[in-house]
Image (spheres, rainbow, N blue to C red):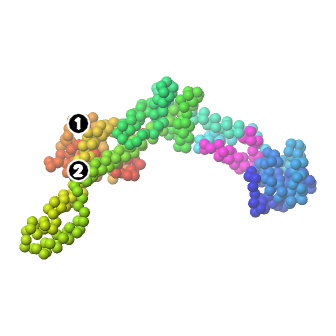
């Protein structure tokens, strides 16, 4: 119980009412004060104080004043004799409570094990739930030491239930591969921790190397053979707690753990990381496609800036051209305009005007296509093997059809420049209008490299993507 109480709080919680005075009756001195404090404490906490030091000082003074007993008399109250036992029994009866039994402990240990521990990882909140249970059933809770033992037994029992259920669903080959993770980590030279350490690590900076490394990581963790529904019956918070626990352990900790515990921790870590890496791959893909496009735009912009000299004061130049033309309508351009505005300046104006958005976008597409085909395209087969996209939203149906087309052709990236004429290639909803001329030639053939880029950009542009337009674990 807290020790600081404001006067208003004391008045509301520690004031003796009529029923309390009937219980205090003709008690006197230390007995009267001790009983009054036990009574009000039990009313607030549904338990008795462990000793006099748990009683708030302001409350002792407040109750002592009401009872007409000096607060110092509390020092004389016997906390272990027959009187306090009688006082407790009298207070229990007044509030309709009873003492706890061994059967209560067994019943509520099982209740904690099955209902509370799987969803609540905080020891304090589990304790609060147990004390609330005692209170709601009007049973006085046992001593703190017994409460602690009960909580430990419930937690241990819940862990046993979870590890037993998990290991029973693991095949012998999966168990062998999980154990190999610890063996490999223990044998790793330099203390890196082998694949187990890589599995816990987040991906590095966005790039092709990172993407391919994450694909390799995903393939290896999938090869362990964990069932997709391994933890389907477990609560999400429970799995998350075990995953956090496994992530903190060193290989030596796992090696020292009991077999069922070790296998469960490894299974949870691998199972959750499969989903996390899969979703992370989709995010990496989106970031990489965006990065490729941004770099292409920056490169073209730098080239354009170096190709042309920005002409300043264009408005003034145009005004002087118009004024001169009106003053000399019958003269030739060379004789009337060039003396006013130099021929070189006019040529710079024309060059700058041609560097418009359309030209800029065409050059960006050229650079983007070159960069993708020469470097980034090699990620496509591995990416399509690692991820499976699903979507029930008809808005993304063209994108899904396009992905299916890419999957069918993933094993022959350089064999055919164009898709066969007999192949149905989704265009609407996949290829932006300003990309059509780069994707479809004058005879209607669809070129694969720019089309693949459009598909990847279409996946990225589904932002935020619908829940089912994500990589499956």
Q: Secondary structure at mark 1?
A: loop
Q: Can residue 243 be seen?
A: yes
Residue drawn 28% across and 42% down? 372
- Relative to 283, residue 200 above or below: above
Q: Position of residue 239 (x, y in %)?
A: 53, 40
Q: Which residues are magenta?
A: 120-147
Mark 2 residue crowding within 10 angstroms, few (<14) / some (14–19) / many (20+): some
Is 5 rendered above or below residue 100? Answer: below
Instruction: Identify residue for label 1.
Output: 414
Q: Residue at x 74, y 50 (%)?
A: 1
Q: Nearest the camera: 120 or 206?
A: 206
Task: Judge whether 354 appears above or below 265 on screen.
Answer: below
Foreground: disc 1 or disc 2: 2
Give the CA distance from mark 1 to mark 2. 23 Å
Q: Earlier in the sequence, mark 1 or mark 2?
A: 2
Which label number is shown at residue 29?
A: none
Q: Which mark is residue 363?
A: 2
């Amino acid at each position: 119980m807290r020790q600081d109480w404001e006067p208003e709080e004391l008045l509301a919680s520690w004031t003796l009412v009529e029923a309390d005075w009937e219980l205090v009756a003709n008690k006197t001195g230390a007995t009267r004060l001790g009983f009054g404090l036990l009574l009000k404490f039990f009313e607030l906490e549904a338990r008795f104080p462990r000793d006099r030091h748990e009683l708030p000082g302001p409350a002792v003074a407040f109750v002592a004043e009401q009872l007409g007993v000096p607060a110092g008399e509390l020092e004389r109250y016997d906390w272990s004799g027959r009187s306090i036992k009688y006082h407790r029994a009298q207070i229990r009866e007044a509030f309709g409570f009873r003492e706890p039994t061994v059967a209560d402990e067994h019943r509520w240990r099982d209740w904690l094990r099955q209902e509370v521990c799987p969803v609540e990882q905080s020891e304090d909140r589990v304790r609060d739930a147990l004390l609330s249970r005692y209170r709601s059933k009007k049973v006085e809770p046992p001593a703190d030491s017994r409460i602690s033992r009960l909580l430990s037994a419930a937690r241990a029992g819940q862990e046993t239930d979870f590890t037993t259920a998990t290991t029973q669903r693991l095949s012998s080959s999966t168990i062998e591969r999980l154990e190999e993770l610890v063996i490999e980590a223990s044998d790793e030279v330099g203390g890196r921790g082998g694949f187990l350490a890589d599995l816990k690590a987040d991906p590095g900076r966005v790039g092709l190397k990172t993407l391919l490394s994450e694909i390799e990581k995903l393939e290896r963790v999938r090869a362990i053979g964990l069932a997709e529904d391994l933890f389907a019956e477990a609560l999400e918070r429970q799995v998350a707690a075990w995953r956090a626990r496994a992530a903190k352990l060193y290989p030596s900790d796992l090696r020292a753990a009991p077999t069922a515990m070790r296998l469960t921790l490894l299974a949870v870590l691998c199972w959750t990381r499969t989903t996390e890496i899969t979703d992370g791959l989709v995010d990496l893909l989106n970031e990489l496609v965006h990065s490729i496009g941004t770099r292409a735009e920056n490169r073209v912009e730098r080239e354009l800036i170096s190709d042309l000299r920005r002409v300043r004061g264009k408005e003034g130049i145009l005004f002087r051209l118009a004024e001169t033309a009106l003053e000399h309508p019958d003269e030739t351009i060379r004789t009337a305009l060039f003396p006013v505005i130099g021929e070189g300046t006019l040529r710079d104006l024309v060059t700058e005007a041609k560097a418009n958005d359309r030209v800029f976008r065409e050059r960006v597409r050229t650079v983007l296509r070159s960069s993708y085909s020469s470097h980034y395209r090699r990620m496509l087969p591995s990416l399509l093997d690692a991820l499976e996209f699903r979507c029930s939203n008809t808005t993304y149906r063209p994108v899904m059809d396009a992905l299916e087309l890419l999957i069918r052709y993933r094993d022959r990236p350089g064999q055919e420049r164009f898709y066969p004429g007999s192949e149905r290639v989704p265009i609407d909803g996949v290829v932006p209008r300003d990309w059509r001329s780069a994707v479809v030639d004058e005879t209607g053939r669809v070129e694969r490299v720019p089309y693949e880029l459009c598909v990847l950009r279409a996946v990225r542009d589904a932002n935020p993507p619908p829940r089912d337009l994500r990589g499956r674990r």
